[in-house]
């Protein structure tokens, strides 16, 4: 899936001259966490978050009265606090790439640019929702883990065993097992009604199935490599 399929296109934008009071009112009215800052030509020049506003809202509160604080914030403009170096993506960016960018850059939103045109925004919440759906999270599924050696045909062996028992795979993904070279952890989600049948099929095929957290993975390894 691509960012263009999940991005928000009903954008709420402000100018650098927008006051902090106005910016806060917009965030509360639209129930959003970020405001995109554009200039008179609609070019993206910055971004300001609800967190940025809260930090700058509270900073002078200890020395000013409520009236004085409100007056001051009516004078302070978004341009003074906005983030000017904005990380962006295109509509053709994959969901997983966007998740990686936000994780490594430690940011919670990505404006979406089609060339020089601002066309949308995507948040960490949006990306997380898609990823959770992709891995089949839900009350009607169960999670099965299988540790396999990294060689051609292993995945086919696992899926064939489930196919033979008419167990439908709702989702499947894998990652390397830390501390063990060439070992992958397959995570399979099936409907909970077929969970026992899936475990039995995999174990009959010679695979050891993880159905819960195990601190020691050695009994579940396909062989005994040197850690």
Image: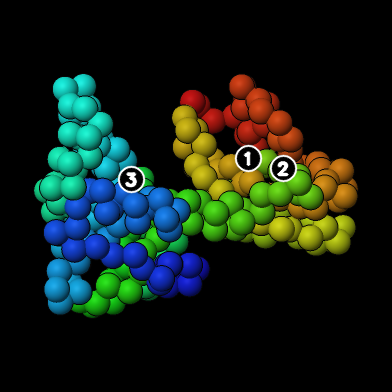
Residue 162 vs 44, above or below: the answer is above
Q: Nearer the viewer, mark 1 or mark 2?
A: 2
Q: Residues within 10 Å of mark 2 (few under 14, many from 20)?
A: some
Relative image position of residue 30 (x, y in whole percent): 43, 58
Residue that carries the numbered disc 2 in the rendered image: 144
Instruction: Return the x and y of residue 115 as percentages of the image width and height.
Output: 23, 77
Q: Sort mark 1 into few (<14), some (14-19) or many (20+) by Cα contacts within 10 Å.
A: many
Q: Nearer the viewer, residue 61 or 147?
A: 61
Q: Earlier in the sequence, mark 1 or mark 3?
A: 3
Which residue is identified by label 3? 50
Cα distance between the residues tagged 2 and 3:
40 Å
The label nearer to you, 1 versus 3, is 3
From this view, report whether residue 207 is shown above or below residue 46: above
- Decide if residue 172 is in sight here: no
Q: Secondary structure at mark 1?
A: strand
Residue placed under numbered mark 1 in the picture: 147
Front position in the image: 136 or 66: 66
- Depth check: 130 or 152 in front? 130
Report whether 210 appears left or right of 130.
right
Across and down, in percent, residue 40 comes to: 14, 73
Name the side, left or right, on which 143 lies relative to 30.
Answer: right
Instruction: Tell me the number on the disc at residue 174.
Output: none
Disc 3 secondary structure class:
helix
């Amino acid at each position: 899936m691509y960012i263009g399929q999940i991005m928000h296109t009903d954008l709420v934008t402000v100018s650098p001259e927008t006051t902090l009071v106005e910016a806060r009112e917009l965030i509360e009215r639209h129930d959003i966490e970020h405001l995109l800052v554009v200039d008179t030509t609609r070019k993206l020049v910055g971004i300001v978050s609800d967190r940025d506003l809260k930090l700058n809202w509270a900073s002078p509160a200890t020395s000013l009265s409520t009236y004085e604080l409100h007056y001051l914030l009516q004078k302070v403009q978004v341009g003074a606090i906005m983030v000017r170096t904005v990380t962006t993506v295109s509509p053709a960016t994959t969901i997983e790439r966007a998740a990686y960018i936000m994780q490594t850059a430690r940011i919670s939103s990505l404006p979406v640019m089609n060339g020089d045109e601002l066309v949308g925004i995507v948040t960490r919440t949006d990306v997380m929702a898609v990823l959770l759906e992709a891995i089949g999270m839900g009350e009607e599924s169960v999670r099965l883990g299988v540790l396999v050696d990294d060689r051609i045909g292993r995945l086919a062996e696992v899926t064939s065993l489930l196919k033979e028992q008419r167990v439908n795979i709702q989702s499947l993904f894998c990652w390397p097992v830390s501390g063990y070279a060439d070992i992958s952890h397959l995570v399979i989600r099936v409907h909970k009604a077929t969970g026992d049948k899936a475990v039995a099929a995999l174990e009959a095929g010679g695979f050891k199935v993880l159905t819960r957290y195990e601190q020691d993975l050695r009994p579940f390894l396909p062989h005994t490599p040197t850690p």
